[in-house]
Image: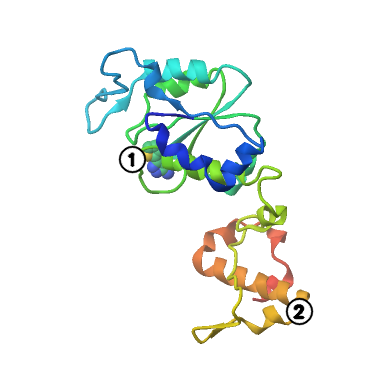
Amino acid sequence: MVSIFPSYLAPLREALLGRAISRGLLELTVHDLRAWTHDVHQAVDDSPYGGGPGMVMRPQVWGDALDDVLAGPPARLVVPTPAGRPFTQALAREFSAEERLVFACGRYEGIDQRVLDDAARRVTVDEVSIGDYVLVGGEVAVLAIVEAVVRLLPGVLGNPRSAAEDSFSDGLLEGPAYTRPEVWRGLAVPDVLRSGNHALIDRWRRDRSLERTHRRRPDLLEALPADALDRADRAL
Ligand SMILES: Nc1cc(-c2cccs2)n[nH]1
């Protein structure tokens, strides 16, 4: 990763991801973009051509940084931006199959477009958005993207079934989950979950997923392939 706030990416070395690094399941290197500045002020941005608010990140600095960081084994350049294509679970899976990913953390007003155009001459460049809202910099987006990608790597999650069964894997939202105690503040766990009848439990869970998806994300239902819903699903 390349960022002007390298410490913003420190959380990637905590907990699950930290353990994956120490277990050699992945390698993480954070570079300070200012290492590639040449002036005494270490300027990384400048006013936008054509006027307008904010600053744009300078091509020379980014160009030199990416020349160095993209050198070595082939990599895919991921650039978080509100103007990017949506980052989805499918894209997370695609990224998790890559040998190497390089993340460029820019500021909201963006990196000079020529940096991405020049990089696209050598590597695949993915401008991705983690949602329709505006952050100040790309670092938070990189934290989210890296967590979504790394959890899919073999051996990272304790239980591989989790990644296979989490929300979006079957195209539906995850339904409600419960654990002990059976009754808490007068609220009881649905009886079916304590019935031991796993066919019934699976059906109930599927129904809750369909219900929740229909209510909260009807767009996901529309996007499902025709054969994804069986007769029992459609009866819901
Ligand atoms: N989805 C999304 C990305 C971003 C930013 C990336 C870089 C600076 S701001 N905001 N929102």
Task: Name the quadrant containing residue 166.
Answer: bottom right
**Residue 172 picture location, percent across and down:** 61, 61
- Image height check: is 62 above or below 228? above
Mark 1 lies on residue: 136
For residue 162, side relative to residue 222 (left or right): right
**Residue 71 picture location, percent across and down:** 56, 16
**Residue 113 picture location, percent across and down:** 40, 24
Q: Residue at x 37, y 24 (%)?
A: 112
Choose between 216 and 200: the one closer to the eye: 200
For residue 82, side relative to residue 72 (left or right): left
Determine whether the beta carbon of the residue marked 1 sits less than 8 angstroms from the nearest atom of ligand 1: yes
Task: Name the quadrant containing residue 177.
Answer: bottom right
Q: Residue at x 31, y 27 (%)?
A: 56
Considering the image in quadrants, where does the C terminus appear?
A: bottom right
Which amino acid is tagged 1?
Val
Which amino acid is tagged 2?
Gly
